[in-house]
Image (cartoon, rainbow, N blue to C red):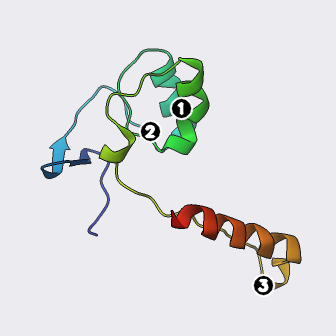
Amino acid sequence: MGEQTYERWSFNFPQGVRTVQVTGDRISDDADIVRRWAVAGLGIVYKSRLDVAEDLRSGRLVELFPESYGQPAPLQLVCAHRTSLTPAIQSLRAFLAKRFES
């Protein structure tokens, strides 16, 4: 993938990937501020489902496109050091890997 820009949003439509140029009167690199703007009705956001799942469940936000239209994002498990990979963390890693395979 090329350089990531937040002025271009890409969607995986059944006919193929479509990238659109977007503009607005706000910009931020703070994901929670952007989420709060959307909840306040100040615009449309293109966010990770993990960031807005509770807002979608509660009805504070409405999904405009099916989940499959968004870009997939890898989930990363980050530990401070190899010694942080305790048996519990290793079990979590194995569980997540199995769960996300499907």
**Vertical side of 97 occupied by 11: above or below:** above
Residue at which label 1 appears: 33
C-alpha span from label 1 to label 3: 33 Å
| For the residues bearing labels 2 and 1, Cβ distance under 8 angstroms | yes
Tag 3: residue type?
Arg
Q: Secondary structure at mark 2?
A: loop
Tag 1: residue type?
Ile
Indicate left or right for 65 with 57 as reference: left
Q: Earlier in the sequence, mark 3 or mark 2?
A: 2
Where residue 64 sits in the image (x, y, percent)?
Answer: 33, 28
Q: Secondary structure at mark 3?
A: helix
In percent of the image, x 53 and y 17: which residue is there?
59
Residue at which label 2 appears: 28
Residue most extreme to the left: 15
Indicate left or right for 62 with 82 as reference: left
**Vertical side of 54 occupied by 21: above or below:** below
**Vertical side of 75 occupied by 34: above or below:** above
Choose between 100 and 74: the one closer to the eye.
100
Residue at which label 3 appears: 82
C-alpha span from label 3 to label 2: 34 Å
